[in-house]
Amino acid sequence: MLDAQIPAQSPLGMEGDLKNPREITSVGGRFRTELNMVIARHDLPYASASLRLYEGEIPAPTFRVSPGDEIEITLHNRFPSNPDSDPVLNTPNQFNSTNLHFHGFHVSPKGNSDNVYLQINPGESFNYLVQLPEDHPAGNYWYHPHRHGSVAVQVASGCGGMMIVRGTLDDVPAVAEAIERVMVFQCPVVDPSSGEVDSYDTIWNLDSERFWLVNGEYQPKIYMREGEVQHWRWLNAGDEQFLPMTLDGLELHEIGFDGNPYDHARLTNKVEIAPGNRSNLMVRAPKVGVYDLLRPAFTQGKTDLPEVHMAQVIVLPADTDRIASDVKKGTRIPEGPLPKNAVLTDITDAEITNHRQIVLGVKETPGMYKDVVFTLNGEPFDPSRDDIVAKLGEAEEWEFVNTTPFPHPIHVHVNPMQVTHINGEALAYKHWQDTIAVPAAGTATVRMRFTEFDGRFVMHCHILPHEDLGMMLNVNIEA
């Protein structure tokens, strides 16, 4: 048996309700599936588009696995040949070559595991084999292409899906009794005249028209019952826009971020997820009505972005007959301390063996795309260079210093980060994240343990055009 599958469906079992994406789950400690990358035609709100997608689906299927699982995925690149055969490093190139990244996973970066230095060309297949540690943190992760030069085009096309590692929050009674929604936010960036995602100029412009989709649907309806609490798993799988989200009239209690539980449920009126971030929310519907899930108008860097209507939440009477009486209904918010992912313990001052400063920059470089490259410590990406060399078993503190007028969500592969300071101010609660939004002209300080896995991996900006244009470096962990 390759896999166990659950079709895309409403978690409430009702017509017109937002469907969770199709799901593939591990069985008996094994996850095994085939994953085809194809060009598929989709009718979007603004164009009929040819999109590069996994299995032709927006979003790709959700993968649900458990700590200790062996994950085997055969990736088939069914794209046509690349028109360009001589790519220039740190420019957009070879849009039909790809690979596969397991975003946030603490696994080996070598061989046929989470190795983003691989290139799978059109017509080729590759067998990924990823071993999850027995103590791997539970939570929300995701998978997406990561071949330098074509990342932005493929993710901006809608190529990506949620990965869920079972455990921790799932076992909290108030969470377990609630309806679960997987919600993947994507915005295929299509040239309306051609219906294709081959114009990097369209992707490059932060204010190009982006119609946000939720699980592939435009402005869908999400149903709840009066007094109900649902567990929502959010993923910003877009290419470069931040998502500060509001849902006035309903209660939002954030219980985890980037796969890791918070210390307790936190009532909030806005949830901020940068590109690549994930959030766990408990959402309470106090009274019958219609409510708007919005991304309010805001300024990202120097660009004003408009309000976006993401979805409509419709709260039905508690005794509605539109939802079967046997559909479970959570009504509680978790109280008291939330369980921790056991291996993510505070990194103490005494553990730190090295302090580094990493400077985020941009510089004019004639002949490159837009005559620009983005840099880390003054240099654009070079896959042959080891920028950071550290030792397995040690812990370090890194300060990201942003010299640009744009925020940069910095993602470090393999090892999660404990965020301790933003703009020099100590955080009351030290978040565990794998993607940290470094403020424009600001700083962020993080700590990391290099545990279990040696080898080379990357750190980069998850505004994906910035990554393609050079804002990435190599980390080599030596045994």
Image (spheres, rainbow, N blue to C red):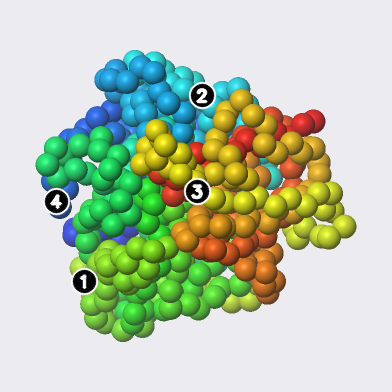
**Residue positioned 51% across, 57% down in the render:** 404
Quadrant position of the N terminus in the picture: top left
Task: Report the side of 310 relative to 144 (left or right).
Answer: left
Question: Viewer-proximal residue, 97 or 84?
Answer: 84
Q: Amino acid at mark 4?
A: Tyr
Answer whether residue 98 is visible to the viewer in this image.
yes
- Category of crowding for the residue at label 1, using alpha-carbon neighbours closer than 10 angstroms: few (below 14), some (14–19), many (at least 20): few
Q: Amino acid at mark 2?
A: Leu
The span from disc 4 to disc 3 (Cα, nearest Å) is 33 Å
Which tag, 4 or 3, sits closer to the chain's start?
4
Q: Which residue is mark 1?
A: 321
Q: Amino acid at mark 1?
A: Asp
- Category of crowding for the residue at label 3, using alpha-carbon neighbours closer than 10 angstroms: few (below 14), some (14–19), many (at least 20): many
Q: In the image, is residue 119 above or below residue 392?
A: above
Of circles 3 and 2, the one toward us is 3
Question: Viewer-proximal residue, 30 or 381?
Answer: 381
**Residue positioned 61% across, 62% down in the render:** 443
Q: In what element is the residue under mark 4?
A: loop
Of circles 4 and 3, the one toward us is 3
**Location of residue 458 in the rendering, given as x and y in whole percent from the top left corner:** 59, 38
Q: Which residue is mark 2?
A: 118
**Which of the 4 quarters of the picture holds residue 57?**
top left
The span from disc 3 to disc 2 (Cα, nearest Å) is 26 Å
Which tag, 3 or 1, sits closer to the chain's start?
1
Which tag, 3 or 2, sits closer to the chain's start?
2
Q: Amino acid at mark 3?
A: Val
Q: Which mark is residue 46?
A: 4
